[in-house]
Amino acid sequence: WIFAWTQNRLMLPAWLGAHKGLQQAIDDGHKAVLDEMSRQWPFFRTRLEMLEMVFLKADLWLAEYYDTRLVPTELWALGKQLRQELSDSIQVVLELRPQGDLLDDQPWIKESIKLRNPYTDPLNVLQVELLGRSRNHAETLHPELDQALMVTIAGIAAGMRNTG
């Protein structure tokens, strides 16, 4: 399950729920405490940085592309809701950053992700096409198609560098 959400670049298990908890603390008037935790508590700062890393690996357009090509239209609203929650999560974490953009404190990780994404993104698009073809021909064996699909899975996993 976790692997699949990484493959479609929504990265859902890594961030789902974090936004709600952080936003509730802000809404309850504890933003100053969260800001202090972000500046002075290494464990909390590390957790926020892990979220930042996931956000840089996520891709809203690709996640939507998977939905529009592979998911029945009656379920599109769920994907839209999840993508909105991801956007909201990014905004809350940006509010808690001391300054700057995602992973500005760790430029080597940020640069590594930015360098890998142009190679990983086309694999995602190809994977969507191959999954569609595989579903359309599920009744017959297509070893070449299955092999190509496995290559995209392995390539995306390698590009994400923290998945199965």
Image: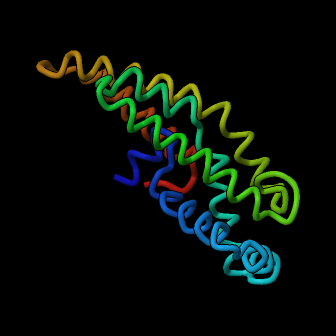
Residue 30: give x, y in percent of width and height. Answer: 70, 76
What residue do we see at 48% from left, 54% from top?
Answer: 163
Count of labels shown? 0
Question: Which residue is found at the position 57% from the left and 29% from the top?
Answer: 61
Quadrant that contains the C terminus: bottom left
Residue 137, horizontal then vertical, whole percent? 20, 16
Q: In this view, does 4 lie to the left or right of 117?
A: left
The residue positioned 55% from the left and 68% from the top of the image is 21
Q: Which of the two residues, 33 or 63, is positioned nearer the viewer here? A: 33
Given residues 129 and 16, the one toward you in this image is 16
* Rendering colour mode: rainbow
Which corner quadrant of the image does residue 135 belong to?
top left
Above or below residue 13? Residue 75 is above
Q: Is residue 44 above or below residue 2?
A: below
- Residue 4's x, y, as percent? 38, 45
Quarter of image, res 38: bottom right
Quarter of the figure with residue 19: bottom right
Whether 7 is drawn above or below 46: the answer is above
100 or 129: nearer the viewer: 100
51 displayed left or right of 102: left
Q: In the current view of this chain or complex, which residue is farthest to the left? A: 139
Residue 154 in picture, x, y percent from top left: 45, 41
In-image side of 7 versus 31 (left or right): left
Extreme residue in the right direction: 99
**Identity of the residue furthest to the front in this view:** 28
